[in-house]
Image (cartoon, helix red, strand yellow):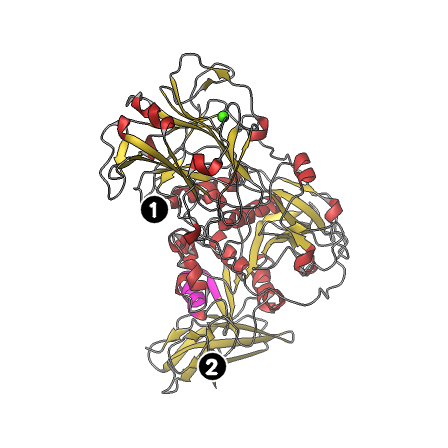
């Protein structure tokens, strides 16, 4: 259920998801060494633009806690201030969650971030995705004096990297009566006195739809539930009067668990005020911003990504990371979008063709690597050598692990973690890693794909702002997961002059490969399936794929083509899956040159090949074709993938069918063929020779009908 919320400087997602362990699915990357030589000469007059720093008005992290002013007028019935607890287990009654693989919660006490005295500190570990504890005894006598107009209030300080969903359960002694307090009625106030609009939902799964509040990472302040808003816990009679409350259970679920991060709870009380302190400046005011509301998460995503189209280009050079062996190609930090409250920085390599200048503008291209990949300077060089400015974005939040990496393909050369001393100088964090699309029910700003797609738009902004680049001639290509990113990005950024998604496409929820599981994970098809937005796409798109791909399947690419107003399909036999293969196809560069440099096109079918077994259609041939051939590529049963498929990749389903081939008759630009009786599904491969290169394009893969 979506809960409407205000849109703020940082945006919150909607539903509180059940916290899932996120399998980090990675497409096969590529092995081998970079054999490319040095890059061409590159001029160095990229305009460095103003950088975006955290605004002074942004909410504080627990480390910058201002001194609030006590409000002497409030009634406070303390339940637990954690100041005098000696036996944690006895006092807190942690719920045994070992059946869920959750280890004993690691509680301690500390004065840092406490509201007063000491606070309860919970240290997160990788097996701490839920903590629950139960308070009983005399401390709950506070409920005897409680009035319905009071609040159940707690002080919370969260780490910068994790949201925490909090659910409170109020129970009676006999256990028959049990309630929660409507989360949507909760009042959340940060330490500076600003109200927070938090996502609400049901993190505890068995409570009710409106039982949990998702406090944002870095939050420090008060959570207050009005006691007038008691709702019966699912399957129970509700608490009939406040003095009946005999136990209080608190369920806390961090969205991210990592070693060492801590969240803090303190001053659990009943009060007539939702806060214990006034704002330091004594002014009680609401956020003055006029803020849109979103009816759906798709609407929020559209807003967040579309907003970036008008954002100024922002990046800084970081010459200490310039790639060895590629003179002229520069390392940069792009200003990324926010992750929670934190600004992100995104590593990229940028390079320009020799001789590019304001009076001799060049086209450009944004390069998005695949799963397990990184930013590759040799990919930038390939495009620079062909006359394009290029920016290769590291779209999974990695950057060089040292200032002198030479093996750009080795995982050990790259890191995702930022040392504390670096963070102290530059508080921006790295964007999230590839989450395999398993985070589509959380808040949008935590999703890897949101960051990755945002990065394509921001990279486009950087190229467009450079005077050496013709802003009307910037395209995009991506490989594998980068092809998925590309397929989504073109639905948002219509400024791209061409696009070449390699392997990846739309209709991934219908893929035969493992990719279908990722795109059928909760919320993903509805939010991220690229086909949702292909109707927006007017630019030329080359869908290029491998006939036997183990990560995607040709039905997806073919359906994507049919949804593309200006699309071309190239299904390649014997291609393989990898970065070298993915950027090695000459079709990519011919297609781009046709789009922005006046080059000759690929062969394009003028119509579909017709119905039944009589294939007949015309082809628009390029003027420079020295030879044109066509062949039918078919399989004799429905396309299927299985663990015993032809590719025999351990742990992966691969294509079961063998491809069969028959030559077509070609007269001028007319292609005809008679499909054999055993042909079940097929496509027609078109091959044009020019300058000693065969360029492949094709009709969509389809069943014989
Ligand atoms: Ca305390």
Residue at screen point 40% across, 70% down: 607
Say left or right for 666 vs 623. Answer: left
The image position of residue 584, as x and y in percent, is: 62, 67
User: Measured along the vertical axis of the image, is residue 228 above or below residue 596?
Assistant: above
Give the label, 1 or 2, closer to the camera: 1
Left or right: where does residue 49 sit relative to residue 641?
right
Q: Is residue 499 visible?
A: no
Q: Nearer the viewer, residue 473 or 487?
A: 487
SS at mark 2 in the image = loop
User: Callout 1: helix, strand or loop?
Assistant: loop
Between disc 1 and disc 2, whose residue precedes? 1
| Residue 265 visible in the snapshot | yes
Q: Residues within 10 Å of mark 2 (few under 14, many from 20)?
A: some
Tell me whether the residue at label 1 lies in contact with that at label 2, contact meaning CB atoms closer than 8 angstroms: no
Q: Which residue was labeled with disc 2? A: 659
Q: Residue 205 has which mark?
A: 1
The image quadrant where one finds the N terminus is top left
In the image, residue 408 lies in the stretch drawn in magenta: no
Residue 247, x across and y down, in percent: 33, 34
Q: Quadrant of the C terminus?
A: bottom left
The single residue placed furthest to the bottom in the displayed view is: 677
Q: Position of residue 661 (x, y in %)?
A: 48, 84
Q: Residue 565: within the magenta?
A: yes
How far is the residue under mark 1 from the one under mark 2? 48 Å
In the rendered image, the vertical position of residue 116 relative to residue 422, given as above or below: above
In this view of the protein, which residue sits in the foreground, 247 or 62? Answer: 247
Cβ at disc 2 under 8 Å from ligand 1: no
Q: Which residue lies at the image location 56% right of the left edge and 77% below the top edge?
A: 574
Q: Which residues are magenta?
A: 555-568
């Amino acid at each position: 259920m979506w809960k409407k919320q205000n849109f703020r400087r940082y945006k919150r997602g909607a539903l509180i998801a059940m916290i899932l362990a996120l399998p980090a699915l990675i497409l096969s990357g590529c092995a081998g060494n970079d054999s490319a030589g040095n890059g061409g000469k590159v001029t160095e007059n990229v305009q460095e633009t103003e950088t975006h720093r955290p605004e002074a008005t942004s909410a504080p992290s627990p480390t910058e806690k201002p001194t609030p002013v006590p409000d002497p007028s409030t009634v406070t019935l303390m339940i637990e201030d954690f100041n005098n607890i000696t036996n944690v287990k006895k006092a807190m009654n942690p719920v045994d969650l070992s059946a869920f693989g959750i280890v004993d919660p690691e509680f301690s006490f500390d004065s840092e971030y406490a509201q007063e005295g000491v606070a309860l500190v919970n240290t997160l570990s990788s097996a701490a995705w839920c903590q629950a504890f139960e308070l009983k005894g005399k401390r709950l006598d506070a409920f005897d004096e409680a009035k319905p107009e009071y609040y159940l209030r707690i002080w919370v300080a969260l780490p910068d990297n994790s949201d925490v969903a909090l659910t409170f359960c109020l129970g009676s002694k006999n256990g028959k009566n049990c309630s929660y307090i409507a989360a949507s009625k909760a009042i959340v106030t940060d330490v500076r006195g600003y109200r927070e609009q938090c996502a609400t939902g049901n993190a505890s799964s068995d409570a009710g739809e409106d039982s949990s509040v998702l406090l944002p990472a870095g939050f420090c302040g008060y959570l207050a539930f009005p006691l007038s808003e008691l709702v019966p816990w699912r399957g129970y009679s509700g608490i009939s009067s406040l003095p009946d409350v005999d136990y209080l259970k608190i369920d806390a679920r961090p969205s991210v668990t990592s070693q060492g991060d801590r969240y803090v709870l303190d001053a659990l009380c009943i009060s007539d005020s939702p806060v214990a302190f006034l704002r330091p400046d004594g002014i009680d005011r609401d956020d003055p911003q006029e803020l849109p509301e979103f009816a759906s998460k798709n609407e929020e995503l559209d807003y967040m990504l579309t907003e970036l189209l008008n954002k100024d280009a922002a990046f800084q050079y970081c010459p200490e990371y310039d790639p060895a062996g590629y003179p002229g190609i520069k390392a940069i930090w792009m200003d990324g979008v926010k992750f929670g409250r934190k600004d992100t920085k995104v590593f990229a390599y940028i390079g320009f063709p020799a001789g590019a200048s304001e009076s001799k503008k060049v086209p450009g291209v944004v390069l998005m690597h695949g799963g397990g990949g990184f930013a590759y300077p040799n990919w930038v060089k390939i495009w620079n050598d062909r006359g394009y400015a290029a920016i290769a974005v590291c779209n999974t939040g990695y950057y060089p692990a040292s200032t002198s990496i030479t093996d750009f393909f080795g995982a050990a050369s790259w890191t995702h973690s930022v040392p504390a001393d670096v963070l102290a100088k530059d508080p921006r964090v790295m964007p999230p890693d590839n989450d395999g699309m398993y985070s589509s029910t959380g808040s949008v700003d935590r999703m890897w794909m949101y960051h990755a797609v945002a990065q394509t738009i921001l990279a486009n902004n950087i190229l467009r702002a450079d005077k050496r680049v013709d802003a009307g001639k910037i395209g995009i290509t991506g490989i594998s997961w980068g092809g998925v990113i590309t397929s989504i990005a073109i639905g948002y950024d219509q400024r791209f002059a061409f696009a070449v998604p390699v392997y990846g496409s739309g209709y991934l929820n219908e893929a035969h490969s493992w990719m279908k599981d990722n795109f059928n994970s909760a919320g993903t098809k509805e939010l991220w399936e690229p086909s949702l937005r292909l109707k927006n796409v007017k630019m030329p798109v080359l869908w290029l794929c491998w006939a036997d791909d183990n990560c995607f399947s040709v039905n997806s690419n073919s359906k994507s083509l049919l949804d593309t107003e200006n699309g071309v399909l190239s299904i390649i036999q014997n291609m393989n899956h990898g970065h070298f293969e993915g950027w090695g196809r000459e079709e990519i560069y011919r297609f781009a040159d046709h789009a922005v440099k006046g080059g000759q096109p690929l062969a394009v079918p003028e119509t579909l090949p017709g119905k039944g077994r009589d294939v007949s259609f015309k082809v628009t041939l390029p003027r420079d074709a020295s030879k044109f051939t066509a062949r039918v590529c078919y399989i004799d049963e429905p396309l299927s993938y299985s663990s015993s498929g032809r590719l025999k990749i351990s742990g992966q389903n691969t294509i079961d069918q063998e491809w069969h081939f028959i030559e077509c008759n070609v007269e001028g630009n007319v292609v005809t063929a008679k499909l054999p009786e055993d042909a079940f599904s097929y496509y027609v491969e078109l091959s044009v020779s020019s300058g000693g290169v065969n360029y492949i394009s094709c009709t969509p893969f389809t069943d014989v009908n």
